[in-house]
Amino acid sequence: MGARQLPLFESADGREHRLTGRSTLAEAVVPFQAYLRGEGKTQNTLISFTSDMRVLTEFFGPDMALGKISTARLNEFLHWLEHGRGIPCSRKSYARRVTTLKVFFKWLQEDQVRRDNPAEPILQRSGPAPLQAILTEAEIEQMLTYCESLAHAEKPDSRPYVLFKLLLDTGIKKSETVQMTVNDIERTNPRQPMLVIGHKNRQNIFQERRIPLDPTWPAMLERYLTEHKPKGGRIFDCTARNLEYVLTDTAKAAGIASRMSFETLRWTCAVRDYRAGMGLETLREKMGLSKISWRETSQKIMRLAAGETMEELAED
């Protein structure tokens, strides 16, 4: 028998459900939805809180008794959200899920399902999330120099240079990198090659981003293709994790202490572009971000460009 699905909306007959400490998480969802409706919560809030209840049930199991959930177990759940689930949990999502826990268990206490509220001691985080550190210009030069030495060694390996330089100049996402093909490189103008990234949005409308490449990069790409002969049509015919290893291992060999990752290079690219005078709207389009998510991101890019440290940003 498969796992039970939690209902998305309150049952049509609107019956009241009498819960006790022995009732299960799965049994509490519909009454919780009814409570939220009675409190005048919006449909979006109802959907979001129900989604959070699904995640809570994913961790504890649908048969977990309401009376057996402790503060310690809730803290284990929050740690799992960030470090054990294997799915990114944004700062915003984390904060909302803490709110869901507090509302849910406060309701259980007020409805005398439980005598206590195990979510009450949980601390809600405040302030913006700390940013990924960026590379200094000295570290960039150090990495490029070492990558070039690998490309021209007795047994040449151009992949580290091709990957590092691509991410440094374009700031593209990990998912976009692993999907790249040779056809995505436009060389109509040799003086200004372009990377063309196409995708369909939620309205099923095809959109594309055109990102300038360093004019010397395609030549190094050809060296790499000759050396590695990637299969399947993609430029990098390996997993994203393997590409992460290429970055971290190369940085370590180059003597760079800073963490090297896709995220590091994405932020580094954005800050360098801003410092070079790129307009914010142009930079937003280059990074492929929505106007909503861009509000916080652009502020942090400007502050990093002004030289603020990661510690100063985290203390805000």
Image (tube, helix red, strand yellow):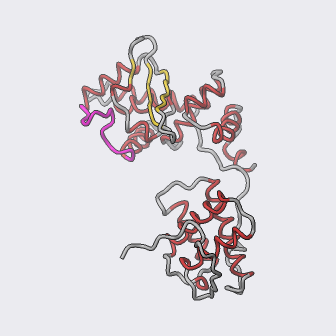
Rendered view: 42 above or below 34:
above
> Residue lying furthest front in this view?
13
Picture quarter with the N terminus: bottom left
Examine the residues drawn in magenta and state their main secondary structure: loop
Q: Identify the residue at horizontal 42%, vertical 40% (top origin).
A: 247
Image position, residue 181 (x, y; %): 34, 30
Of residue 134 and residue 73, the one placed in the foreground of this image is: 73
Q: Identify the residue at horizontal 49%, vertical 21% (top origin).
A: 212
Image position, residue 194 (x, y; %): 44, 20
Image position, residue 273 (x, y; %): 60, 26
Image position, residue 180 (x, y; %): 37, 33
Q: Identify the residue at horizontal 65%, vertical 21% (top origin).
A: 277
Q: Is residue 37 left or right of residue 287?
A: right
Rendered view: 121 above or below 270:
below
Of residue 51 and residue 219, the one placed in the foreground of this image is: 51
Q: Which residues are magenta?
A: 229-241
Q: Is residue 150 magenta?
A: no
The total of numbered circles placed on residues is: 0
Q: Identify the residue at horizontal 45%, vertical 73% (top origin).
A: 4
Rendered view: 37 above or below 287:
below
Picture quadrant of residue 178: top left
Q: Is residue 237 magenta?
A: yes
